[in-house]
Image (tube, grey):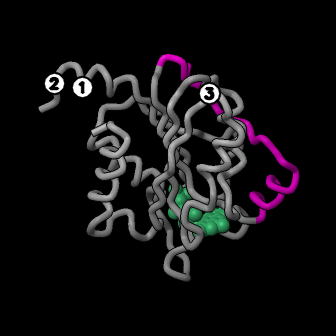
Amino acid sequence: MESSTEQAASSRTLLIWFSRDGENYWEGGRRDLAVGNTERLARLITERIEVQEYEVVPADPYPEAYDPTVERNVREQNADARPAIAGELPDAQDFDTLLIGSPVWNVRAPMILSALVESLDLTGMRVLPFVTYAVSGMAGIDRDYREVLPDAEVADGLAIRGEDVEAEGTAAEVEAWLRDNNLL
Ligand SMILES: Cc1cc2nc3c(=O)[nH]c(=O)nc-3n(C[C@H](O)[C@H](O)[C@H](O)COP(=O)(O)O)c2cc1C
């Protein structure tokens, strides 16, 4: 049972995630995911700590199919694009800590995450990145955030292989990461 002080502290935590369901990479092949890997990883977090949650929804949704998504992402990376986000963004300054999750796309965060962090005022905030991936691990995404967010304190990220989100041991890994960052 959390004390009221801990509850007050954790309600100052914002969790933002982007995840794509549909056809995706899975163990060298493809699989149709009803719920994306990063969303399922976000669930492991929300089952453990109190957060305010915000899903990044692209104004122009990514395709259901894997290959066209890869192609669109390459085009967006090459153009240094900032894909539009549907709906209103939260006011990050209402929070102390931002947990920010996404898949790894072509060895970096999807460009819509650049659009997101550039649209938020993260001054003075603690930022904790997490990713799901197939082979690349964290892919330097925590370093990338550190570079573009000099006024925030960006911690080392949590990287979970997409196929392992529900594997034995992953929940404990998430808990250890939350504990290391004084959120649990
Ligand atoms: C467009 C695209 C690009 C990807 N690029 C990489 C990559 O560079 N490195 C990697 O390890 N995984 C890559 N993946 C695999 C995803 O990171 C992985 O399947 C992730 O868990 C998907 O999360 P999601 O279901 O939340 O979208 C890519 C997947 C897609 C769709």
Q: Which mark is residue 24?
A: none
Look at the image and say whether residue 29 sits in the magenta stretch.
no
Write the start and end of the magenta stretch as one range.
71-94
Q: Is residue 107 left or right of residue 42?
A: right
Residue that numbered label 2 is attached to: 3
Q: Which mark is residue 6?
A: 1
Residue 35 point in image, percent of width and height? 44, 56
Query: Which mark is in front, 1 or 3?
Result: 1
Reply above or below: 158 against 112.
below
Mark 1–mark 2 CB contact (< 8 Å): yes
Q: What's the residue at 32%, 62% (across, down)?
A: 170
Q: Residue furthest right?
A: 79
Is disc 2 placed on a helix, strand or loop? loop
Query: Which mark is in front, 3 or 2?
Result: 2
Q: Quadrant of residue 164?
A: bottom left
Q: Amino acid at mark 1?
A: Glu
